[in-house]
Amino acid sequence: MISATDSLNNSGVVIFSAEIVSRTKLQAIRIVQNGTVLAYESSKIPEQQDSITYVYKSLIPLKAGQNIFYIEAKNAFGTGISDRRTIICRPEPIINWISPAVASSVDSSGMLKLKAEIITSFDLLSSGINLNGTPLSEQKEGITRTGNDRYILENDIPLKEGENSIILSAGNARGIGYSQKRTISYEKALIAETKTNLPEAVKTEITQTLPIETEKVPETKIEIKEPAVQPAVLPEVPVANNEKPAEAPERPAIKTDAPVLAWLSPSRESTDINTSSARIRLSVKSSERPQSLLVYVNGVASEDINLLQRPGHRVNTQSRNPSV
């Protein structure tokens, strides 16, 4: 059994640990990496913990990209083979977007506040921002070290009208890593705020400010009143003297909207991490007060989370990820 699970590694080495159970004396072992037997590792003798249990530990260098490991052990009755373990080695920095969180978005301010996390096991040597195919000056400010291998990059980027594409880069002693592309459309057009799921006979007042460069225009207030709902009038149906008048058909119940869930973190469908746990965040919008929340990890539901709290309350839950 190999203790290292499938994971991401950017340090370039892995601590390899295996436990071998054999009721007869262990004769030989072989460590296989990407189909090649590691001769210098196979010559080592495992440590015997008791009469049937052996433990093998070693520090093995990784190759850039995919590394597939398994171990073979032989005794007088035959050879046993372990399950395979895959480790992706990325010695260059890993860049994860925080804001903007989605691949494509729209901005009306003309100034983008970008934020990203940089993960590197080696010291960060450089960072850069590529806007619309043009590298901006090297980013020496706006970088904060938050841990031994983690940095936060924050910066304000002016946008041109239309579509803007941004790619981040970061370098260490092993190479340069790049982020996924973010596309931001800068539109100066007025974006009106709309409200839905309003109850009947609600009067809504919307204040709109129209930005005009040549002259100032006073704020315009638009009052919107929704028309009152008139009850349906059913035609009278003549009935015989001995018959009871037919009852009016019941109106179908008005269906309420189901809750709308939006991911905040992680922001992408697939995210590389090098830890055994991950914190998830999401927003829940509902016309009715939500009652409960279930989180599914690899098809298994978590315990029911009670959401009968004040509106706007946020619930954070941390999920352990055994396979990334």
Image (cartoon, grey):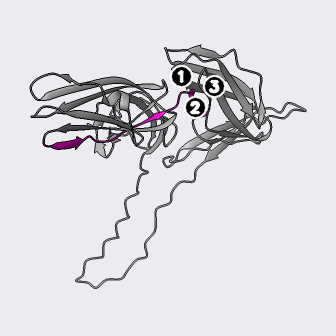
Q: Say which label, 3 or 1, has the lower sequence index.
A: 1
Q: Residues within 10 Å of mark 1 (few under 14, many from 20)?
A: many
Up the image or down, 258 lies above or below 76; here it is below
Q: Which residue is mark 3?
A: 170
Q: Crowding near pointer 3: few (<14 within 10 Å), some, many (20+)? A: many
* Image location (x, y in percent) of residue 149: 50, 18
Residue under pointer 1: 120
Mark 3: which amino acid? Ala
Q: Position of residue 89 (x, y in %)?
A: 48, 32
The residue that appears at 13% across and 34% down in the rendered structure is 22
Q: Residue at x 57, y 43 (%)?
A: 203
Q: Nearer the viewer, residue 23 or 233?
A: 23
Magenta stretch in the rendered image: 77-100
Residue occupying image coordinates x 67% and y 20%: 126
Give the mark, 2 or 1, whose residue is nearer the N terminus. Answer: 2
**Residue situated in front as seen by the camera: 129 or 260:** 129
Instruction: Estimate the spatial distance between the alpha carbons at disc 2 and disc 1, rounded to whole Å.
Output: 15 Å
Q: Examine the rendering and report whether any part of residue 186 can be seen.
A: no
* Secondary element at image label 1: loop
Identified by mark 1, the residue type is Thr
* Overall secondary structure of the magenta section: strand
Marks 3 and 1, how far apart at CA: 9 Å
Q: Which of 169 and 307 lies nearest the eye of the viewer?
A: 169
* Quarter of the figure that contains the C terminus: top left
Between disc 2 and disc 3, whose residue precedes?
2
On the rendered structure, is 202 left or right of 51? Answer: right
Q: Is residue 202 magenta?
A: no
